[in-house]
Image (cartoon, coloured by chain):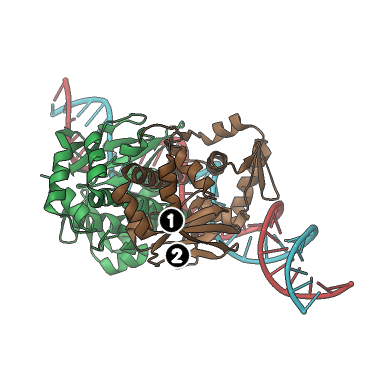
Chain colours: A green, B brown, C red, D cyan
Amino acid sequence: MLESLYLNLGQHDALSDAEKALLAGAMTFERHFATGQDIVASGARPTYSTLILDGLAARYKVLENGGRQFTSLQVSGDFVDLHAFLLKTMDHGIVALSPCHVMFADHSRLRAITEQAPHLTRLLWLDTLVDGAIHREWIVAMGRRSKTSHLAHLVCELFVRLQVVQRTSGMSFHLPLSQVELADVLGLSVVHMNRVIGALRKVGVVNWANHTVTILDWHRLQEIAEFDPTYLSMMREPR
Amino acid sequence: MLESLYLNLGQHDALSDAEKALLAGAMTFERHFATGQDIVASGARPTYSTLILDGLAARYKVLENGGRQFTSLQVSGDFVDLHAFLLKTMDHGIVALSPCHVMFADHSRLRAITEQAPHLTRLLWLDTLVDGAIHREWIVAMGRRSKTSHLAHLVCELFVRLQVVQRTSGMSFHLPLSQVELADVLGLSVVHMNRVIGALRKVGVVNWANHTVTILDWHRLQEIAEFDPTYLSMMREPR
DNA sequence: AGCAGGCGCTAACAAATGTTAATGCTTAGC
DNA sequence: GCTAAGCATTAACATTTGTTAGCGCCTGCT
């Protein structure tokens, strides 16, 4: 049941059976969330962290003028709020962008891991560091890439991340995001978002229909995006 | 000598003398960097993490078209690359934006801390989590705030962070950033950066001259920025 | 003293992006 | 079967942001 988590953490360094058992032991109950439901509310002080077994979720903030900005996308195998284990107070909300099957890891048991399992602790820490690396890449994309390049970069990133947890099929993956939601990822108006998707389609590197993205020319897509997966730390090495 | 680090880490939770000693014990030699010098190069695999004792530095990435984007600003008391302890490979560079006095913490000794000092480990982890929280706030600012609001938010954030490590004087602080550099923070052209600074000045909430920012109306500045310091986790509580 | 370069600033114009509105398609609910 | 709502798409127009160029003020260098 925790396969996607093991794949996610295990991509960076070997994960022993004992460590897998510790992770499993930290889990409490599971739950389903419907599309659009809040998984964690902004301002909350959860006593557990939420792992996505299957589904797509996003962190977001809403401004006074009603504008919404997603700050990350979380896929199967991701903890959506592992940071809340130490940050304590959620400064943003987390919403399900597809039906989500999740499981909750108790903070007291995560704390026990930090007391007794240093290597596993480092791997969990690393998981949040990769989060940060992704944030930085998004900042670069928002600040200095063309919008087409930004979108291309997002497609590259999602494809690679989904591949790690075996949620791709060939060069395709399911991306259940409306253009409104996508606009809240890139920080654009819906109208312009539509233009940008059109532009990427026109180049012919992706096929994008029915919430399914198919990469037709990975090499050129990567080129447009200037995508370098280093920041995802997918090298398996001692940590 | 490590006062700023103690102030930084200690703002989130009590830091014992034993923990301070462990931190001090992790330090090796110190060094000075001149303005504009690279402190860490992109692609490097450092065996130590760099602490800023005094000065201002920034993480950045450069794109093929020459565009540069800063992804964070690091002040006194910040580790600029604590994440490299586990990420191993730097996916970005770090540059000194002012003369920087730094000290290096050996990764092997940081690792020893994770093996023997769980609470201190959590505080170091937390430090990188706050980094991530700041990244998220930047993403929101870049995507959904007006440029004036973005700049106002940056001023609020820097003021609060500098206050923690006692680098403010009254409502003023030193900000040795040229408009070119500031533009690379907000993701703007220099010309537009100049317009935005002008706009903020015109509102009369800040005085900005000679690399010194003075906040004239904190309340209104905070309003323009919609600044809510929750994300900085400045509450001292058990972690 | 004289010069080159970095910096802050402005103007004029070009390009990117947002806003408002409208169309047709699909789907959920009645 | 009908209707309302959400979604993708486009057009026309407004606003924001970028580009290129130039000016004046410094500072460091010779």
Q: Which residue is mark 1?
A: A140
Contact (CB < 8 A) between labels 2 and 1?
yes
The percent coordinates of residue A93 (x first, y second) are: 33, 34
Side of B202 relative to A228 (left or right): right
Residue nearest the observer in this picture, B137 or D23: B137
Chain identifier of the residue bearing label 2 in the image = B
Q: Is residue B232 visible?
A: yes
Which residue appears at 43% of the width and 54% of the height? B25
Chain identifier of the residue bearing label 1 in the image = A
The secondary structure type at the circle numbered 1 is: helix
The percent coordinates of residue A111 (x first, y second) are: 26, 39
Residue nearest the observer in this picture, A18 or A207: A18
- Characterize the local packing of mark 2: few (<14), some (14-19) or many (20 or more) Cα atoms within 10 angstroms: few
Q: Which residue is mark 2?
A: B63
Which residue appears at 56% of the width and 57% of the height? B101
Instruction: Give the residue type at disc 1.
Output: Val
The percent coordinates of residue D6 (x first, y second) are: 27, 35
Which residue appears at 70% of the width and 50% of the height? B210
Instruction: Give the residue type at disc 2.
Output: Leu
Q: Is residue A84 above or below residue A187?
A: above
Residue nearest the observer in this picture, B204 or B10: B10
Which residue appears at 36% of the width and 57% of the height? B109
- Picture quadrant where residue A41 is located: top left
- Picture quadrant where residue A204 is located: bottom left
Residue nearest the observer in this picture, A41 or A46: A46
Label disc, if present, on residue A43 of the rendered structure: none
Q: Is residue A101 visible?
A: no
Side of A224 relative to C11 (left or right): left
Pick the quarter of the image with the C terminus of chain B: top left
